Image (cartoon, grey):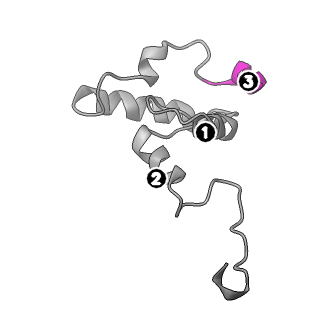
Amino acid sequence: MMMLNWSRRAACLELDPELFFPISLEGPGRSQVEKAKTICGRCPVRRPCLEYALDTRQAHGVWGGTDPEQRRELSSPAAPRPGTVPAPQLRGGR
């Protein structure tokens, strides 16, 4: 079971969760996402929140200051995870 102790220190802890889970990322939802990201920007646990979202493949909402599209980009095989270092190439391209 994944420990979520970090979540007790989240800037969003006492805010309406609907702010972080807009119905759409278009129209009024876009400003809602931007407001949520602003809150995440000052959050002391932004990194573990983002890591949790990536590890658990959260497909909806704002997590760690990212929207679903940004997390998909971070999760793509070509994109390194935050805080990781790419492995060196082995001889022969393996």
Tell me which residue sits at (54%, 60%) in the image.
79
Amino acid at the residue labelled 3 = Leu
The secondary structure type at the circle numbered 3 is loop
The secondary structure type at the circle numbered 1 is helix
Tell me which residue sits at (36%, 27%) in the image.
32
Closer to the chain start, of discs 3 and 1, is 3
Q: Where is residue 4 in the image (x, y as percent from the top left)?
A: 73, 24
Q: Mark 2 points at which residue?
A: 73
Tell me which residue sits at (59%, 12%) in the image.
14
Closer to the chain start, of discs 2 and 1, is 1
Quarter placement of the C terminus: bottom right
The secondary structure type at the circle numbered 2 is helix
Q: In the figure, 34 relative to 16: above or below?
A: below
Q: Specify the label residue 4 is tagged with.
A: 3
Amino acid at the residue labelled 1 = Leu
Quadrant position of residue 83: bottom right
Magenta range: 1-11
Q: Is residue 92 magenta?
A: no
Quadrant position of residue 31: top left
Q: Is residue 7 magenta?
A: yes
Residue in the foreground of this view, choosing between 50 and 41? 50
Q: Distance between the residues labelled 3 and 2?
A: 24 Å
Tell me which residue sits at (49%, 40%) in the image.
66
Residue furthest bottom as drawn: 92
Q: In the figure, 80 relative to 9: above or below?
A: below
Badge 1 crowding class, 10 Å Cα cut-off, few under 14, some 14 to 19, many 20 or more, is: some
Q: Specify the label residue 50 is tagged with.
A: 1
